[in-house]
Image (spheres, grey):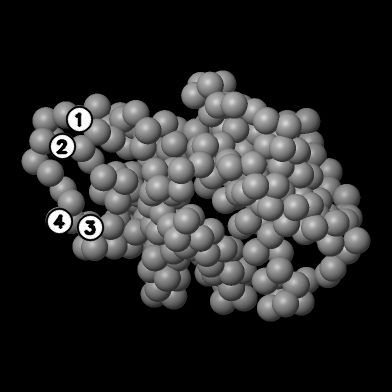
């Protein structure tokens, strides 16, 4: 239970950090690249002793590490572009509602039982996430850019399921802490290649504040993923329940911090969404 709570806390901290990026005019892409390297260093620094020699012999995990790295950096690119073209609200909803993909894959792939109480909890979770994420501002989605929302919806759901499948069926003797470090480090390598190309083309310049922002972001980013993988193993709950509670809790906590710290507007839609989120967490907890 503790890893799950800390994973939710780490993911919420990421939300807060991103909020401050705009205030301090941080180059998000540069920060993201340095964030991946920071996360990898933390993983190997804290849990390097868990590395086992036979990990290099049984390398069935290697393609999955590269797949996760590609999804980490690729989805970030699309997310940034979609936010500019389709709007922040539409992009946010596409990403957060993507848990539908992963939940369906988990329940079908692992033959999980679906009780009435659990089904009610999942419905409440979707309702809460949608209402809290939505906005009253109307955003136009062009036909040429709608594919980005679809890609984010499918890709984000696929990433959640992939991470779950890896810890369940692929890791073997490798620990989640080491795999997380390798995956994030690989994403950093891919991102740095793109960053170098941008530097050569004189499209950007590295600034110390962006490096520092990346370091700050990398700490909770590492633990948000590592602790989620650990939660799948330690809670004793079904994987779909862990994912649903995690996602809706992050949305709930982020919204509350947004109201209190950033003085975001409280609407009746968001209040109803928060209530639905709380009921979803309670219902899913009781169901397990």
Disc 1 on helix, strand or loop?
loop
Give the numbered dot on residue 49. Answer: 4
* Mark pair 4, 2: CA separation: 13 Å
Give the numbered dot on residue 59. Answer: 1
Which residue is painted at 54% across and 44% down in the image?
Answer: 242
Crowd band around label 4 with a 10 angstrom C-alpha radius: few (<14), some (14–19), many (20+): few
Which residue is painted at 79% across and 39% down in the image?
Answer: 141
Which residue is painted at 72% across and 77% down in the image?
Answer: 260
* Mark pair 3, 1: CA separation: 19 Å
Crowd band around label 1 with a 10 angstrom C-alpha radius: few (<14), some (14–19), many (20+): some
Residue 118 lies in quadrant: top right
Please tell me which residue lies in front, 241 or 117.
Answer: 117
Disc 2 on helix, strand or loop?
helix
Residue 170 appears left or right of 110: left
Which residue is painted at 61% across and 57% down in the image?
Answer: 250
| Label located before the other in sequence (4 or 2) | 4
Give the numbered dot on residue 47. Answer: 3
* Mark pair 3, 4: CA separation: 5 Å
Coordinates of residue 224 in the picture (x, y in percent): 45, 56
Please tell me which residue lies in front, 148 or 173.
Answer: 173
Give the numbered dot on residue 55. Answer: 2
| Label located before the other in sequence (1 or 4) | 4
Coordinates of residue 115 in the picture (x, y in percent): 67, 30
Please tell me which residue lies in front, 66 or 102.
Answer: 102
Disc 4 on helix, strand or loop?
helix
| Label located before the other in sequence (3 or 1) | 3
Q: Is residue 216 above or below residue 38?
A: below
Of marks 1 and 4, the one in the foreground: 4
Crowd band around label 3 with a 10 angstrom C-alpha radius: few (<14), some (14–19), many (20+): some
């Amino acid at each position: 239970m503790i890893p799950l709570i800390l994973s939710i806390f780490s993911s919420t901290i990421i939300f807060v950090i991103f909020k401050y990026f705009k205030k301090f005019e941080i180059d998000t892409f540069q920060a993201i690249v340095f964030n991946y390297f920071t996360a990898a260093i933390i993983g190997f620094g804290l849990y390097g002793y868990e590395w086992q020699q036979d990990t290099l012999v049984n390398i069935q995990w290697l393609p999955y590490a590269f797949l996760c790295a590609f999804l980490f950096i690729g989805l970030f690119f699309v997310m940034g572009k979609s936010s500019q073209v389709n709007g922040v609200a539409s992009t946010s909803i596409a990403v957060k509602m993507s848990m539908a993909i992963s939940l369906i894959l988990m329940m079908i792939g692992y033959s999980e039982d679906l009780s009435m109480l659990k089904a009610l909890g999942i419905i409440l979770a979707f309702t809460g996430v949608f209402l809290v994420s939505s906005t009253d501002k109307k955003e136009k989605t062009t036909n040429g850019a709608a594919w980005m929302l679809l890609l984010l919806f499918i890709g984000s759901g696929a990433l959640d399921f992939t991470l779950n499948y890896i810890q369940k069926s692929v890791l073997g003797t490798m620990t989640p802490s080491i795999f997380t470090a390798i995956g994030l480090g690989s994403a950093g390598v891919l991102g740095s290649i793109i960053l170098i190309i941008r530097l050569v083309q004189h499209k950007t310049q590295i600034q110390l504040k962006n490096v520092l922002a990346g370091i700050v972001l990398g700490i909770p980013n590492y633990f948000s993923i590592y602790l989620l993988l650990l939660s799948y193993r330690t809670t004793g709950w079904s994987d779909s329940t862990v994912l649903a509670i995690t996602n809706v809790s992050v949305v709930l906590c982020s919204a509350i911090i947004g109201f209190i710290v950033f003085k975001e507007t409280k609407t009746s839609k968001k209040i109803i969404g928060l209530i639905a989120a709380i009921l979803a967490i309670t219902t899913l907890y009781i169901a397990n």
